[in-house]
Amino acid sequence: MRYKPMALVAHTDNDIALLARLMRAEAEGDGELGMLMVGNTGINRVISNCLDFTQLRNIDDMVYQSPGGFEATQKGYFYQRARESDKRLARRIIQGERQHPATNSLWFFMPAGDCPAQWYDQWNVGRFKSHCFYAPTQEDCPRVYR
């Protein structure tokens, strides 16, 4: 029997497709690694139960959070069918794969220039291609530091 790791969050096939669409729409230009980092950030929001994310209980809540959600949900590209390659990436994230600098991040954005040291009072933890990532402190959001 093959060991299958436990998922970080409960999910359905529809949730996998939804996360895959979000990852693609937010970061396809940054390649698979950038998409994985967006997925890290999203799943961190679901499990965090802190700061701006205390009402999120599942992937659907996270993707469509308003205010404070993802800009991609307002664009047509987000609503295209999830590709199998993107679903594979989403499954990796749901199973717990983490990518630095998004390991503990709850926010990211694409600045016109350099990453600000802080964004909405959160510290920059790194940049990958076009996106800057920001993480809370372990004291503020201990669940993100699992």
Image (tube, rainbow, N blue to C red):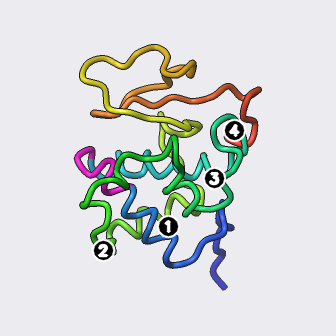
Disc 1 packing (10 Å; few <14; some 14–19; many ≥20): many
Look at the image and tell me in which quarter the N terminus lies.
Answer: bottom right
Disc number lying in front (1 or 3)? 3
Residue drawn at point x = 73 percent, y = 28 percent: 140
Which residue lies under the disc numbered 1? 91
Decide: is 139 above or below 55.
above
Q: Position of residue 98 (x, y in %)?
A: 53, 47
Question: Residue type at mark 2?
Answer: Arg
Residue drawn at point x = 74 percent, y = 42 percent: 143
* Label 1 vs 3, first from the N-terminus: 3
Q: Position of residue 34 (x, y in %)?
A: 35, 45
Disc 4 packing (10 Å; few <14; some 14–19; many ≥20): some
Q: Secondary structure at mark 4?
A: helix
Question: Residue type at mark 3?
Answer: Val
Q: Secondary structure at mark 2?
A: loop
Q: Position of residue 28 (x, y in %)?
A: 27, 52
Q: Is residue 55 left or right of residue 87?
A: right
* Label 1 vs 4, first from the N-terminus: 1
Q: Which residues are magenta?
A: 23-30
Q: Secondary structure at mark 3?
A: helix
Which residue lies under the disc numbered 2? 81
Q: Could you tell me how far apart the alpha carbons at marks 4 and 3 are, in whole angstroms? A: 13 Å
Q: Could you tell me how far apart the alpha carbons at marks 1 and 4 are, in whole angstroms? A: 20 Å
Q: Secondary structure at mark 1?
A: helix
Which residue lies under the disc numbered 3? 46
Q: Position of residue 91 (x, y in %)?
A: 49, 67
